[in-house]
Amino acid sequence: HVKPLTPIKTKPKLKRKKSLQELHQSISDPALSTRALDEIRVHFANKKNSLGTCISYGLVNTAVVLPVEMSFGAIIFSNSAFIPYLPVLIKLVVISAVVHQISFSALSSLPFAIGQVQDAGLIFLAAMANTIVNHVRARELDDSHILATATIILPLCTAFLGVGLVIIGNFRLAGYVQALPTPVIGGYLAFIGFFCGQSGLALMGGVNVVNYSDWHKFFASKVAILILPGFAGGLGIYLLARKLRHMAVLPVSIMSLLFCFYWILMFKNIPLDEARSSGWLSTAEAPPVWYHTWDFLQFDKVCWSVLPELAITEISM
């Protein structure tokens, strides 16, 4: 009788980590990309969330995103020519953000995709808005021409940018971005933060600040008083977000600041008109009825002659 041989147990071979070049090749390989997307779709198809969970996540995202989009609108239209019309202009920006969110979530190949407007384009859109104001005023036209030109040409420029991104994605040209030097990318990101910070301080103080030469306006006594609570609140949110690292930190902090502001007004018995005249609330005109939100979009009043001046900014964006 021959004793059967016992199979030798061997350790499974460890998979070698892919190099950076191999990862880039797998990402650019349509077959591998399609397979990965199919696996993601199957995973999320089997993972069903309750309606209450979906609504909760939606409310959290709304509490975080809505103030951000409103501030984006105030930054884009920070020129003094737009101040009387800010409620309608901010409403248009929020509506465009809603359209962006619906399109991104409904049409993305990733089932979990939640995308919202970035702050990267604020620099260019604000510069375009200022160019439009200067161009129209140089021709001694009224505010209706400024509003029509801004509310029609800025979306067109954004649409052209979107077409460019789609072309880059379809032809897989995003890899060429890696050719940009790191200091260029880092410097641009740093300037975005600087620009948003400067615009936020100017928005709180109710002053028009364009560059360093205007920073002395922040130190005026009345302006500093208006800025201090917002600066303290922003610093507090930053520290809490770094310390707690929970998704509820941002929405709860934002809602708490809003609650504290109106609680102080009620406790001090300060009417809204007095708070508005003191600079704590916007002095813009009251927004019209919702179906008049698009009244600024008048194609017959658009100054198309401003397009050549916006070409370089559009290409840079």
Image (cartoon, helix red, strand yellow):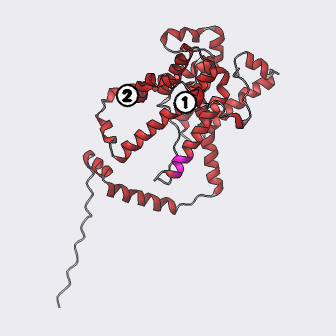
Q: Judge whether residue 60 is colored magenta.
A: no
User: On the image, numbered disc 1 is attached to which residue?
Assistant: 238
Q: What is the quadrant of residue 150 in the picture? A: top right
Say which residue appears at 36% left-offset and 29% top-offset: 185
Considering the image in quadrants, where does the C terminus appear?
top left
How far across and how far down the image is residue 306, in percent?
A: 49, 23
Say which residue appears at 50% left-offset and 49% top-offset: 113
Task: State left or right for residue 91 relative to residue 159.
Answer: right
How far across and how far down the image is residue 271, in percent?
A: 81, 21
Neighbor class of circle 2 (other Cα within 10 Å; few <14, some 14-19, many 20+) is few
Q: What is the quadrant of residue 65 in the picture? A: top right
Numbered badge on residue 186: 2
SS type, badge 1: helix
Mark 1 or mark 2: which comes first in sequence?
2
Q: What is the quadrant of residue 37 in the picture? A: bottom left
Of 78 and 35, which appears nearest the observer? Answer: 78
Report the span colored magenta.
102-106
Neighbor class of circle 1 (other Cα within 10 Å; few <14, some 14-19, many 20+) is some
Say which residue appears at 61% left-offset and 30% top-offset: 298
Of 70 and 91, which appears nearest the observer? Answer: 91
Task: State left or right for residue 63 relative to residue 131.
Answer: right
